[in-house]
Image: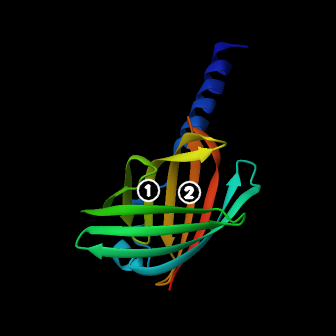
Amino acid sequence: MNTRRLTLMFSAAAAAALLGCVSPKPADYATEKPALDLKTYFNGELVAHGLFTDRAGQVKRRFTVQMTGRWQGNQGTLDERFTYSDGKTERRVWRLTDEGNGRWTGRADDVVGVAEGRSAGNALNWRYTLALPVDGRVVEVQFDDWMYLMDDRVMLNKAEMSKFGFRLGEVTLSFTKL
């Protein structure tokens, strides 16, 4: 194979790899309506229905989440109570902070470090590491979590889970404000 052909093949592979790394940014949704105000949407009672699919797209777990949100100034608490289809239950309490200019931080007992969020228009993107119990041990997985406000009551959520950069699966949720 000649050098020109190798150079073209390498260039094409590099371009494909770079395009695969391009991902949306919250600013891409800045003009989308209705505008998401986390303090308004996550205030009061909500319910969510969701599922986890593995990397092949097979549903592995279904669940319902009852949530209560409360705010004081720029500080909020989101109390999530999970019930899984196998009857197991879980609780996560998020402590959220509005950092201004569409920037958010979040903490919870099973979040490693701090969740970083960015919002614009109808969208919010959270990125965080979650310590998940799996088969008697705890595994740290990364979440790239996107929320999209559909109307004043419904928000859709899609989160990709990964470990060492490899996709493990996806969590899909539909929130309804009660």
Give the labeled residue for mark 1. Answer: 126
58 left or right of 101 in image = right
Could you say whether the residue bearing mark 1 is in a helix, strand or loop?
strand
Between 142 and 3, the one nearer to me in the picture: 142
Pinpoint residue 65: horizontal percent, then vertical percent: 56, 71
Q: Residues within 10 Å of mark 1 (few under 14, many from 20)?
A: many
CB within 8 Å, label 1 to label 2 = yes
Q: Residue at x 53, y 68 (%)?
A: 81
Pinpoint residue 20: horizontal percent, then vertical percent: 58, 42
Q: Amino acid at mark 1?
A: Trp
Between 11 and 56, the one nearer to me in the picture: 56
| Label number found at residue 114 | none
Quarter occupied by the N terminus: top right
Pinpoint residue 121: horizontal percent, then vertical percent: 39, 71
Q: Amino acid at mark 2?
A: Ala
Q: Most extreme residue toward the top, as rendered?
A: 2
Res. 37 in view: no
Q: Residue at x 51, y 52 (%)?
A: 144
Compared to 74, does 153 lie above or below?
below
Q: Residue at x 61, y 58 (%)?
A: 171
Res. 178 in view: yes
Between 88 and 110, the one nearer to me in the picture: 88
Q: Residue at x 74, y 54 (%)?
A: 57
First in sequence, mark 1 or 2: give its number.
Answer: 1
Between 61 and 31, the one nearer to me in the picture: 61
Give the labeled residue for mark 2. Answer: 159
Q: Residues within 10 Å of mark 2 (few under 14, many from 20)?
A: many
Give how far apart the Cα atoms at labels 1 and 2 are.
9 Å
Could you say whether the residue bearing mark 2 is in a helix, strand or loop?
strand
173 left or right of 54 in image = left
Based on the displayed image, in which of its 4 quarters is residue 50 positioned?
A: bottom right
